Amino acid sequence: MNNSARVIVTLKCSLSCKNCANNNKELIKSAREITSPQELEGYDDIVITGGEPLSVPHIVEDIVNHLHSPDRTIYLYTSGFSEKGALIYHKLDGITLTIHKEVIMPIWRSVLTAWESTIEEEKLEDVNNRLFIDSRLMNKLTFKPGVWDEVKLIRMLNPELCSIPENEDFFIFKENGNVFNCS
Ligand code: SF4
């Protein structure tokens, strides 16, 4: 068993990015199924991802509320925003917002603005807030200076080249026997 767990909490996502790692069916099949946050108690680091995790904020809340501890880090990877999730954002150690080229401009603008307001209003200065921008959007996307701890351009990989880091165990969350699937 590794120290870190990467957990897909849903495969559901309103986007259909060509380079989505979830298009790598072999990778998804390799994820171990879990049905409760208790099954992750042995891990020091948790990475919550999807699909879009904030399309199922109740699962994210459940995991964070259950596993939040000074001895453990919890990171959320998202491309969206949910006001419903705001209750647990201050319990996270890191939030990584990725803006993909496939998102149309008015949407990424509203997602970015919602996060920037939340980071400022909820005083999330103890959270490591990272903004990742699809390199194909270089020079097209503007963000608020001073809000993000790190901003970086990322190059999207062919999904067949995506893999789970060696130090991580990989899980997929099932609720009532179902994975929340792509809509
Ligand atoms: S936003 Fe993320 S999960 Fe959704 S389709 Fe794009 S890469 Fe996949």
Image: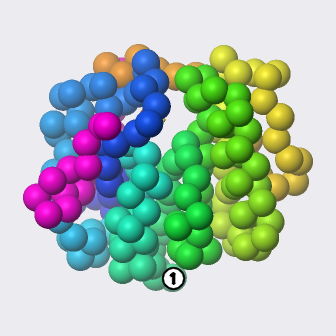
Q: Is residue 170 magenta?
A: yes
Asked if residue 43 lies left or right of residue 137, the reply is left
Scheme of colours in the image: rainbow
Asked if residue 122 lies left or right of residue 85, the reply is right
Q: Give the residues in magenta.
A: 161-183
Query: SS at mark 1?
Result: loop
For the point 30% across and 25% down, the residue is 23
Q: Which residue reaches farthest right?
A: 145
For the point 47% across and 66% down, the residue is 74
Residue 93 seen by the camera: no
From the viewer's side, name the closer residue of 86 and 30.
86
38, above or below 133, in the image: below
Q: Quadrant of residue 62?
A: bottom left
The residue at which mark 1 appears reads as 70
Report x, y in % for residue 181.
25, 42
172, above or below 100, in the image: below
Report the magenta stretch's main SS: loop
Picture quarter with ligand 1: top left
Q: Is residue 180 magenta?
A: yes
Report x, y in % for residue 11.
31, 42
Report x, y in % for residue 59.
35, 65
The three-letter amino acid code for the residue at tag 1 is Pro
For the point 23% across and 33% down, the residue is 27
1, above or below 50, in the image: below
